[in-house]
Image: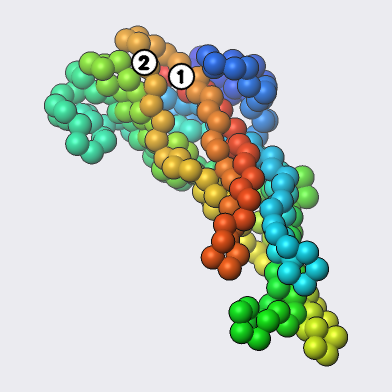
Amino acid sequence: MKQFFTGLLSLALLLTTGNYVSAQDKPLPEIKMPDIPYKPSIKKGWVGQFVYSLNFNDSTGTGKGKNRVYYHVIVNRLNSGFVELSNEVRGAIRKNQPDKNNVQRYECWINSGTKNTWSKHDEIDTVVLPTGLLGRDGITGRLEKFNRYTSDSNWVKGFLSNVDLQIDYETGKYSLAVPYVDYVVEGTETLVETVYSTGKKTSKINKDNKRHELRNFSYLTVGEWMMLEGDFKNGQQELIIRQRIPVSLEQFYNEKKLPVKKGFMEFYMVLKKVG
């Protein structure tokens, strides 16, 4: 037993300090696993660490002066955690799988219990919009909204959900339900409203404790991101996954789409089989 936990601690150290490169058509920027709290408890199954890294700084808009429409998003976000898939399920766990009760064909593991995640979050959202009944009374003012959410470079504790693993030995494929993170970061919302007819300007600052999720962005959109598939060889003891997830700043004004600005969220995960 002592050797087992020593091995898991070595795995934790390897995952947090190691440098893995997966096969890609083009070299991708290096990603290192952050050093986060972890106490191994798994005796059999799959264990490993994941990290999401998002760095986005871009804007979109149209018009000038009173007609100005402007969105600017700056977000630097790092989400990480350890996954312990310790509950084995006999047969397939995905829907509509052929021969789903064949325990020799499928190896499936699900997460058990509540697991913590750790996140660093720094986000500034700026929005400037004309106000008034456009097309009727014209533009009568301007609304400026500034949101700031930050963990001040500290790790914020959150929760893990969704993750599981299915291996199909007949097709030589694995499918991974990617880990989701959920956490709360304190922030402020500043509203500045200008009315042109009277030259009046008012401002208001609200404190805002916002719940953030993997797919929840203030103004960015992310494509379908729920399941990953890849090749798996019989006897394989490790999965190294590297994926780029497209994100984009997409907004509309007056039923017209503003110029789209694109970026990426990086995903990196290393899973090892134990027991």
Residue nearer the viewer, 143 or 207: 143
- Residue 2 visible: no
239 sits to left or right of 119: left
93 sits to left or right of 116: left
Residue nearer the viewer, 137 or 207: 137
Badge 1 vs badge 2, beta-carbon distance below 8 Å: yes
- The label on residue 184 is none
Label 2 sits on what residue type? Phe
Residue nearer the viewer, 184 or 52: 52
18 sits to left or right of 214: right
Question: Label 1 to label 2, Cα distance in Å?
Answer: 8 Å
Q: Position of residue 133 (x, y in %)?
A: 62, 82
What crowding class fits label 1: few (fewer than 14 Cα within 10 Å), some (14-19), or many (20 or more)? some
The residue most toward the right is: 199
* Above or below: residue 32 compared with residue 132: above
Label 1 sits on what residue type? Leu
Q: Which one is earlier in the sequence, the residue at label 1 or at label 2?
A: 2
Q: Position of residue 236 (x, y in %)?
A: 39, 11
* Above or below: residue 177 compared with residue 240: below
The residue most toward the bottom is: 198
Residue at 32 percent of width and 28 percent of height: 166
Colouring scheme applied when the structure was drawn: rainbow
In the figure, residue 155 lies in which quadrant? top right
Q: Secondary structure at mark 1?
A: strand
Q: Secondary structure at mark 2?
A: loop
What crowding class fits label 2: few (fewer than 14 Cα within 10 Å), some (14-19), or many (20 or more)? some
187 sits to left or right of 45: right
The residue that label 1 is drawn on is: 239
The residue that label 2 is drawn on is: 232
Q: Position of residue 210 (x, y in %)?
A: 62, 61
* Above or below: residue 142 compared with residue 25: below
Residue at 78 percent of width and 50 percent of height: 152
